[in-house]
Amino acid sequence: LAKTTQPISMDSYEGQEVNITCSHNNIATNDYITWYQQFPSQGPRFIIQGYKTKVTNEVASLFIPADRKSSTLSLPRVSLSDTAVYYCLVGAPGGGYQKVTFGTGTKLQVIP
Amino acid sequence: DGGITQSPKYLFRKEGQNVTLSCEQNLNHDAMYWYRQDPGQGLRLIYYSQIVNDFQKGDIAEGYSVSREKKESFPLTVTSAQKNPTAFYLCASSISRNSGGYYEQYFGPGTRLTVT
């Protein structure tokens, strides 16, 4: 399984755009990149997923360079409710399983 | 509404007792997972199951056991052999296909287990 590295914590003011970068140097050809959000005492929630280039949904954008060795989650105009831990995951099914590894994530603190 | 339920939300047990955590899903997902999360840490995989009557050990299976007798249910037993059982336990499910691609995991609300 590909190992991921992301910052332990980040602070941002309300209304700013936040970019969280994840490094995954040994990503495999079949691996997808997925980001989850977790609030305290809750289960993680899927945010966005991509394989290459750029993916955008109503919540975030995901930028993946051509070599796929890193990815950047972009949250536009964050609010206090975006304070959470964000996990970057890299993985692919093997024989039908989706076994991926959650690291320690990035704790985002949004400041008023 | 479709989703995953875990019960109870909080559970207290005395050391040396086995305890079973419930996980039920009505999403018609094939795969189910159990994770453990300690304070300030990420999630660690305990067990996962792709189909009924089949399951595989994750990274920290020692001291835990599971069963998958029904597609909807994947209970986790924390045995007395687990040395540090106090933690937040999360159950998840996902579609499982052999056609490739990655399918997101849907998580339950979690059970916070305290053993004293």
Image: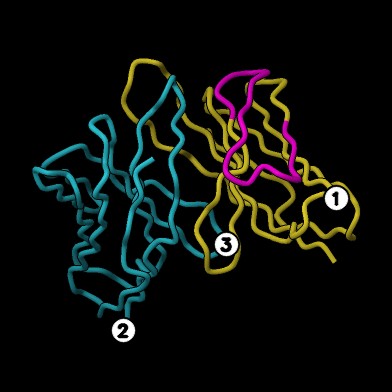
Identify the residue position indicated by label 2 in the image.
Answer: A112
Which of these two is toward me, B84 or A41?
Answer: B84
* Percent coordinates x, y for residue A20 in the rendering: 25, 63
The residue under label 1 is which amino acid type? Ser
- Which chain identifier belongs to the cyan chain? A
User: Secondary structure beneath disc 2?
Assistant: loop
**Which residue lies at the image location 62% right of the left edge and 35% below the top edge?**
B57
Q: What residue occupies the far top of the structure in this picture?
A: B99
The magenta-colored residue range is B49-66
Q: Colour of chain B?
A: yellow
* Percent coordinates x, y for residue B59 in the rendering: 57, 44
Name the magenta segment's main secondary structure.
loop
The residue under label 2 is which amino acid type? Pro
Q: Which mark is residue A41?
A: 3
Q: Tell me the chain of label 2.
A: A
Q: Calculate the distance from the C-alpha at mark 2 to the C-alpha at mark 3.
A: 23 Å
**Which residue lies at the image location 37% right of the left edge and 70% below the top edge?**
A8
Viewer can see residue B111: yes
* Percent coordinates x, y for residue A66 in the rendering: 8, 43
Identify the residue position indicated by label 1 in the image.
Answer: B80
Which of these two is toward me, A6 or B71?
Answer: A6
Asked if residue B65 lies in the magenta stretch, the reply is yes
User: Secondary structure beneath disc 3?
Assistant: loop
Asked if residue B107 lies in the magenta stretch, the reply is no
The label nearer to you, 3 versus 1, is 1
The residue under label 3 is which amino acid type? Ser
**Which residue lies at the image location 82% right of the left edge and 49% below the top edge?**
B81
- Along the polypeptide, which appears first: circle 2 or circle 3? 3
